[in-house]
Image: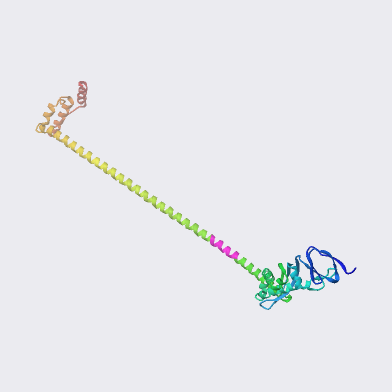
Amino acid sequence: MFGIRFIKFDATTHAIVYKKGKLKREGRGLAFYFHAPTTSIVAVPTGSKDIQFIFHNTTADYQAVSIQGQITYKIEDPRQIAEMLDFSVDVRGNYKSDDPEKLGQRLINEAQASVSSYMQNLELREALKKAKEIEEHIFTGLTASRAVKLVGVVPLSVNVMAVKPAPEMAKALETKTREDLLKDADEAIYRRRKFAVEEEQKIKESELNTEIAVEEKKKQIAEKKMESQLLTAHNDRKLREIKVDADIAVEQQKQGLIDMQAAHMRKEADAKAYVLDATLTPYKGFDWKLLMAINTKGNDAQSNIALAFRELAEKAENISNLSITPELLTSLVQQQKTAK
C-alpha cells in the first residue's frame, strides 16, 4: 500500500540503503520498511563462498590440459564492491543484474591467467604431477591481482582436484604408462634375479673364502706344530748333549779318581816293595836251609818232611831206589796232629 515494503536480510549479508540517491543506512542483518519507489537497496554477501572452476591451458610441448578445482573467497569491503558491481536487489531480495554471478567468473579468469605462464614452462608429463604447485601459483596470483583487490575480494584458499590431459592423450599416456609399468616389472624381475644370482655368488665366494681361511689356519696350525716339534727336538738334543756332557764329566772325574787311586796304589806298592826290599836285602846272602832252620816255625814235622823231600828231589839223579810207604806218611801226619 502506497509503495511501502518490508525486507529482511540474514547476518552474513551486508545491506546498504539509499533513498533518493543518498545513503540512508547500512549494516548486517538489517530488517526494515522502505518506500519502494524512492529507495534502492544493495545486498552484499560477506560470508565465504566456494566457486568451482575448470579451465584449459597448453603445456610447453603443445598439449592441452584441463585444470579442475575450487576457489574459496569472501568479500571483505562490501561498499567497495558495491561501487564496482551491481548488487542491488528488488523488493523480494532478488538481484536485479547478473553482476554477482560475474564475480565468480572474474576470479576464475584471474586464476587461469595467473597459472597460464607457469603451465607453458611445463611438459605434459611434468604438468600432470604439479597439482600442488598449480594451487600455489593460483592463490599467489589471486592475492596479488589488482582486479581482485579493486572489488574488495580476499581469496581464502585454492584447491586443485585434478590436472587432466585430452582424452586421446590420456589414452596414449595410459598405454605408454602401461608399457612402462610392464617394462619396469620386467626390469624388476631381472634385477631380482640378478640380485639373487649375485647374492648366491657372494655366498659361494664367502664359502670359498671361509674354506681358504680354514685351510690357511690349518696350515698355520701345522707350521706351529712343526715349529713346536722342532723346538722340542732341539730341546731334547740339548738335554741329551747336557746329559752326555755330564756323563763325560763324571767319567772324567771317575778316571781322575782311578788315576789317583792307581797312583796311590803304585806309591803304596812302591813303599811296600821298598820296605820288603829293605827287609830282605840283609838275607840275600844266606842259605835257604839256614833260614828254614832259624825260622821259629821250621822245626815242625811237616816242615822237616818237606825239607827232606826237597833235598831228595835235588839229588834224585844219585838215588837209584827210594821207597816211601803210605803208612810212613800217615804216621807222620798223625804225629803232627797229636803234637798240636
Where on the picture, by quarter, is residue 86?
Answer: bottom right
Which residue shows up at 49% across the image and 58% down it? 213
Q: Which of 7 and 76 is in front in this view?
A: 7
Q: Give the range drawn in magenta.
A: 195-206
- Residue in the picture at 34% in, 49% down: 238
Left or right of 60, for residue 202: left
Q: In this view, does 111 lie to the left or right of 215?
A: right
Residue lying at 58% horizontally and 63% vertically, measured from the top left? 199
Q: Is residue 329 magenta?
A: no
Q: Main secondary structure of the magenta part?
A: helix
Instruction: In this rendered view, identify the residue nearer to me: 169 or 47.
Output: 47
Q: Which residue is the extreme one toward the left?
A: 285
Q: Quadrant of the N terminus?
A: bottom right
Seen in the image, is 170 located left or right of residue 31? left
Location of residue 193 (image quadrant): bottom right
Residue 303 in view, yes or no: yes
Residue with the most extreme top position: 338
Q: Position of residue 132 (x, y in %)?
A: 68, 68
Q: Where is residue 54 in the image (x, y as percent from the top left)?
A: 74, 72
Q: Can residue 171 be seen in this view?
A: no
Image point 76% across, 71% down: which residue?
82
Asked whether 14 or 251 is in front, the reply is 14
Residue 128 locus on image (x, y percent): 68, 72
Q: Is residue 79 left or right of residue 231?
A: right
* Total marks placed: 0
